[in-house]
Image: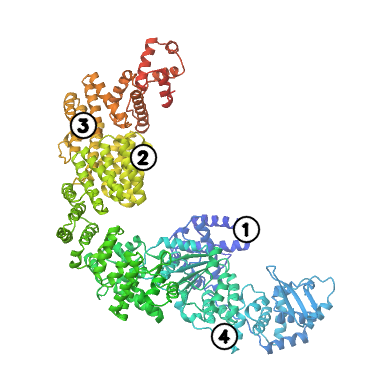
Amino acid sequence: MSREAQPSITDEGQQMFIQYASALHQTPKLSSVTVRNYLSDLRQFIAWCEQKDASHITFAPENITLALLMRYRDYLLITLKLKHASVNRSLISLRRFFSWASASCLTQCDFGSAFTLIPRDAPMPRYLNNEEERALLAAVGTSGSLRDRAIISLLLYAGLRAHELCALTPQQVHFNQGGVTLNIIDQRQHVREVTLEECSALSEYVASLPSECTYLFMSTKTGKALTERALGHLVSKYAKLTRLVDISPQDLRHRFGYCMAQTLPLEQLARVMGHESSASTVLYLRGVQTSSSTIRPAIPVLASKLSPPHLPSLVIERLRLMDWLDGACSYPLTLIQAPAGYGKTTVVSQWLTVRDMLPTASWFTLEIDDNDPFRFWSTLAMSLLEKELAQCLIQNPSNEIPTLLLNELVHKSHDMLLVLDNFQVIREPRLVEMLTYFLDHLPPDMRVILLSRSEPLLPLMQWRARGNLREMIAADLRFSMEETLTFFSEALSTPLPETLLKRLDTSLKGWPAGLRLLSLGLTHSRVKLDIEQALTLSVSNPASPYKLLLDYFDTEIFATQPEFLQRFLLQTSVLSRLNVSLCNALAGDEMSTSSLQMIERSGLFLEASDAGWYSYHPLFAESLRRKATHNLGEEAVQRLARFASQWYEQQGMHAEAIEAALLSRDMERVALLFAHIEMQGDVEDMQTILRWVEPLPEVVLREHPMLCVSIASALRFSQASLPLPAMIAARIETLLQMAEESWRQRNMLSWVGVVWGNRALIGLDLQPLAHIARSARQALALLPPEDPDKHIQVWIGTCQYFTGSEMLFLGRVKEAHRTLLAAKERSLFLKNYFLSNSIHSALGKCSLLQGELRQASTYQREMLAEARKQSDHEMVVDALSELAWIAIERNDLVSAEQQVREALELARQTGVRQDLHVQACLQLALLRYAQGEIEEALQDILDLLPHQHQVWTSDNSWLYARLYVWYSRLLLATGNAQAVEVSLGEGSPTVIERLTRQVMQGRVFLAQGKARPALRTLSSLLPLAEEYGYSSLVLEIQLLLALAHSACKQHQQARRWICEALSRASRESYVRLFLNEGKPLVRLLRSLLPALQHDESLLSYTQMLLRAASQSAEQALSSSGRLLYEPLSVQEKRVLRLLTSGWSNADIARELIVSVNTVKDHVKHLYQKLGVVNRVQASEAARLLKLD
């Protein structure tokens, strides 16, 4: 391809060409010739792209594909028949163009090294033999000048390059007793010394030179320095005399290299030849190797050892591990240590693939034989270097190879990553010492990742202290619940329920190989029921999906251990937790310390906990126990387990004692131990209880009725979905009847009461509240209040809570309050968290109904503090929502917003009960209403209505009463009284709800202008509300009565009711109770101010309400563009400004050019609107409202 040719291109191509040319001209250190070559290659490519027979496209970088580039390369090779060097030169030009286009955002593809250059085998340098060298020396000795003899000698015996010889000056030549030393300066201005033991021709020649000679070798024609071209002619002239063809100065330099390669090691030869990298020096060893019988042969290396293993067919995305490995790139060394099957190799291989690092990463999978230093370093050199360079490197002694290898790696131009997999096999001390040296001296741009099942014999502590090491352990590699869910979703055709996934997470502990083997075992289970049944099969069942996992442990882990360690593993397989003392006692020797340390170092699924305690991975322990039964015999295993159970009991470790007792088949012991734990209240996990006591036979259960109660309770509360399956419900009742019969036979009636208390507790969310309360009352009739037994007292408090909740549900607030207070005293004494918080929640609701905001706030704050401490998210959401309600009522909207936002966020994150989420959403809607966003608040509540439960319980009746009330009130606020009236006909199951619906009917009458029907309705409701103790509802009715009398022009009666409401509400700082009634009530409050002059407390409270109303109106204006209350007119604002400045009425009249009476009218209206009675108060109100 001629670079002078200028093929025509389109305007679009020419525009791109000009942009690139401008960028090249601005690039420093690019010669004009280089720029011209780059542009010529690009123009040729653009023209080819735009040819009709090529791609039929207008040239644009984003349209270029890798396939098109490959076609262009073939075009240059096949059609134009260019040499490989010319094709590669064009491809390199295009690489530079696409890098620029990508950086300029003209394309998303920076092809970079994606398309490869055409490989070229470097030609072997010509190898002059001894006879040819002697003939050349004879020719120049006979026919050549003194200068020519010196030149040929330097080329043959100093190995100088042509340009180095031509640039030599007399000052670079130093003669001494040992011979001649030349200071050679290469093109990079690097200086090296070349020593010749004897060179008579050079000595004679230098002696003959005149003192003013600038260069050592001058041209006889020009009188200047000899040129490289002239040097070539000179060598060729003497070669022809000996009938040698195509001999160049470089061939004489190569002759020197070949000769020196026979005696010098590779690295030293590279220095003598002036090579920066030994890669260039390798060529001189080829000729030597063909004739030498002492060359160290390379060890055959299996190709798969030097590449990552293939990824499994199913690999899920694990972003957290990918990000972790990204971060590891900033450390020289990374250690990933975990037992077999934790996915170390898979994770790193996946990372290399995802990050597109496979082409530049080196991989070495180690085996036992690699403990041989020569074998190890040979293979490592093969993985890091070119084959020939690696072959040369291993000709050196093994102890020198690490240093030589490090020196070679320094010259690599790109970042290097080396992965050493299966590193736990390296145990040879000499190799470990060499490896430590190698890893301590890595080049700055090299990173090494070690994958090991056990802790390597390397100075990890030193590297940690220096900050050179990043570590990942088994816990980091475990699958999270989300990853487990994703894996099984892709591996199985049927999704697994959450409860089953949690069980698998408990048994597998996120072990990746376990998940994969288990999924293979479940492959034949087509439906969810089949899978659940398969997972419940005993591991001894051949159809159990766990069998593959246990076989893996047996063959891959246990069978590879030495005999003494196998015996230790089998003996300790009965231990749920183990330490040195227990293992020594069990094994009857003192070898446990070394055995445990060896197991831990070997990565045998031994997990360290606190203070020297360990535990086996659950499935590994199961595999060991199965093996122990087979090898030691069932009786021996039971004897070991019985000994362990007794040892645990002596140490106060009753849970571990039960586990061992189950293995020993001693069911009576299990029952006794569990009874002790039950009395201490140490076990709360229902699945654990069921696993312990369900295997107990009926004869044991009848002797231990408390176990029957525990199993019944565990069965109930271990069920994730309701209602209970008929079989479970029947089993629960059978157990409770068995317990009741056993205690009645012993005349232990108080414990019969415990059975009835359990019936009440088990009935939660399953039975109507009346049924639960009936069981609770039956229990209270049998439970003696004076009994000192803690458990009896807990059940008395629990049953009091149930009966109190029923009273609250039925509207008997005063009775409920008394009963719940009695339950509270017991819960505080017993320090029963769950019971105490449930009672606090119910008492808070009682206090709100009784209008006691302060007491309700106290209960909720106490509950919130304890719930936070216990991380009880549902209780936290409940308490925050109730506190937000109280804050809104007090018009503390900032606190209310903080509380409701926290409640909603926590509800979203933790997935609390639906009614709690609805409760928080309702508070948010009421907050928006208080901020003046009525339409938005109404829509929010409307969105919540479909979530109403069909069954009203003690938990949700309170919530949905509120939901209905506020939905109706906001409908009225938007003028839709008809919609409210239609819904009033719907039935309601509670007294609270019935009363609130009837109050709402009174509101509808008022909204429709029917004041007298409203008076009749509300007047009849007031005594009922008083009777039931609904003080909050009493306050609401009193305000509505005031508004109804006002609408009937009965102002005295209106003021009487509003004064009564103010008096009662002021004690609890109600605000929104008044503000929510809107303008009519605000006007009533203003009209009341003169009558309150002699009651400072009520006057101050009323003024506060009016200021809050004014602020609320301003806020509503800013949010919705309309006022809820009457703002000041322009003239009133002028009067207020002058009034607060101290002007008299007369002065204000003259200023505004009005009469004094007019000013007085303005002042009167001002006072009413601001809720004040004098100038001082008006000034303060103006300041607070920023009206001055």
* Colour mode of the rendering: rainbow
SS for tag 2?
A: helix
Tell me, yes or no, if residue 496 can be seen here. Answer: no
519 versus 943 height, above or below: below
Q: Quadrant of residue 936?
A: top left
Front-most of residues 1010 and 159: 1010
274 versus 100 height, above or below: below
Q: Quadrant of residue 18?
A: bottom right
Which residue lies under the disc numbered 2?
897
Front position among marks 3 and 2: 3
Of the two numbered discs 3 and 4 on the same chain, state the one appearing first in sequence.
4
Which residue lies under the disc numbered 4?
296
Q: Are the two marked residues, 4 and 2, in contact with CB atoms closer than 8 angstroms?
A: no
Of the two numbered discs 1 and 4 on the same chain, state the one appearing first in sequence.
1
SS for tag 3?
A: helix
Which residue lies under the disc numbered 1?
28
Q: How far apart are labels 1 and 4 at the CA level?
A: 48 Å
Q: Position of residue 736 (x, y in %)?
A: 17, 58
Residue beneath the point at 21% across and 51% down: 764
Identify the image quadrant of the N terminus: bottom right
Amino acid type of disc 3? Glu
Identify the image quadrant of the C terminus: top left
- The residue carrying pointer 1 sits among few (fewer than 14), some (14 to 19) or many (20 or more) residues within 10 Å by Cα, namely few
Amino acid type of disc 2? Glu
Of the two numbered discs 3 and 2 on the same chain, state the one appearing first in sequence.
2
Q: Are the two marked residues, 3 and 4, in contact with CB atoms closer than 8 angstroms?
A: no
